[in-house]
Amino acid sequence: MKKRILERIYFLLFIFFLFFLFIILSFLHKKEPLLEEKKETTELKISDAPPSLSENKVIIQKRMTLTDILGPYNFPPIEIHKLREEVKHVYDLAKIKTGHEIRIFYSEDEKFISLEYDIDSEKYLYIQKKENVYLAEIKKVPFDITVKMIWGVIEDNPISAVARENEKDILALSLAELFAWDIDFYTDLRQEDSFKIIFEKKYLYGEFVGYRNILAAEFTNQGKTFRAFRYTYPDTEESDYFDIDGNSLRKEFLKSPIKFARITSRFSLRRLHPIRKVYRPHYGVDYAARIGTPVQATADGTVTFVGRNRNSGRMIRIRHKNTYETMYLHLKGYEKGIRKSAKVKGGQVIGYVGSSGESTGPHLDYRIKYRGKYINPLAWRFRSVKPLRMEFLEDYRKEAGVYRFLLESPLNLFSNLSFCI
């Protein structure tokens, strides 16, 4: 009898919170960017053209030109030049990229009617011919957006935990990137760590095509809980993640230059050198990883050195703000465009793990200097950057407060939920 009463109570709570959650999500839907997504679903792509039109899809190959693509549709060179010039103020067709898709729509007599070019995963260029003039506009892909919430417990790694909730690897990687300034997702994780994610899924004509944004997330690591809330500034439409008080999740430096790497040697003032067999300082942290594993810059900065440096092998040195400097040793090679004076962003791939120089095996030796002196990358407390702009703090707290309620809600007692917006 007691069990039945509890089941009824849980069921009533479930109905109540479903109703309340619907009201909350309706409120959020009135704010950007969700309103924008509602509008997108009302758009019709030219793919829904009258049945009399035929469609031809072309995946742009290397060295393929607009002439190669449009030639079969009675487009002489002078007409292609006219097309490019008349739409250039909207999009320069000289910038079409290998691997992107172009869709050409034509009549029964193979007369050109219109064209679509996928600029990226969110936008496409639409061109049509009217009265011998080419008209162009950039449209948004008409995705249907579903907001979903999942939660789980870490048994081995985040990828497996997210997969158990029937979601893709990329969502777990996005979660790791979100908290990468506070948690090293290899060295810091423990069994029974837990997570919750509220995120957007994209569907096109009923088919799942990928994820959009994580709207809010929580990660409990070794008993300490971290939370992230996405906020888009109404004036600039720029987005970032903050804690409940408006502090940026981003710190001056990421906790690790490699995702999911294993630490084999830590910062030490007296370590037995594995080759020379003498005690000497080790001013970096060694991350063991397979040869070719991407290495990322841990903060924005300017490259000051790229090349071989004796025992350090191939290395990169980067100068950062506030007198910081980072070094990446024993690399196999460098990412294209990484050279002296190049500007890099935190999280940008700059090179690849190797075993060059004085090394016993594939690994990255990562080092940081502050005011010219080596510091322990794992122990140093880095400051947050770019807190929320004060004029939007009240609006942010209202929005973040709704997501916090969802993360703390007893709904977590029930099955994972999703809601179409």
Image (cartoon, rainbow, N blue to C red):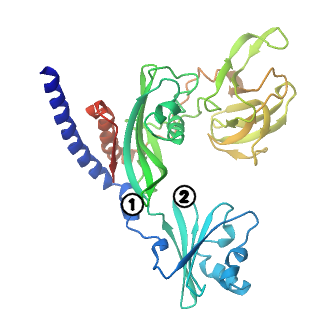
Task: From the image, tell me which residue sits under label 1.
Answer: 36
Position of 199 compared to 129: left or right?
left
Percent position (x, y) of residue 61?
A: 71, 64
Disc nearer the start of the sequence (1/2): 1
Q: Nearer the viewer, residue 369 or 352?
A: 352
Contact (Cβ within 8 Å) of mark 1 with mark 2: no
Image height check: is 104 above or below 245?
below
Looking at the rendered image, the disc whose residue lies closer to the viewer, 1 or 2, is 2
Position of 142 compared to 93: left or right?
left
Image height check: is 185 above or below 278?
below
Percent position (x, y) of residue 158?
A: 51, 31
Numbered label tally: 2
Q: Name the residue: 39% across, 59% down.
A: 37
Q: Name the residue: 41% across, 69% down.
A: 43
Cα gap from disc 1 to disc 2, whole angstroms: 16 Å
Q: Name the residue: 42% across, 19% down.
A: 223
User: Farthest residue in the bottom direction?
Assistant: 131
Q: Name the residue: 62% across, 40% down.
A: 346
Q: Nearer the viewer, residue 274 or 70?
A: 70
Position of 204 compared to 287: left or right?
left
Image height check: is 241 above or below 87?
above
Q: Residues within 10 Å of mark 2 (few under 14, many from 20)?
A: few
What amino acid type is highlighted by mark number 2? Ser
Q: Nearer the viewer, residue 190 or 74?
A: 74
User: Farthest residue in the right direction?
Assistant: 310
What amino acid type is highlighted by mark number 1? Glu
Percent position (x, y) of residue 289?
A: 70, 28
Percent position (x, y) of residue 88?
A: 62, 76
Quadrant holding the N terminus: top left
Quadrant holding the C terminus: bottom left
Dot 2 falls on a residue whose secondary structure is loop
Q: Which mark is residue 121?
A: 2
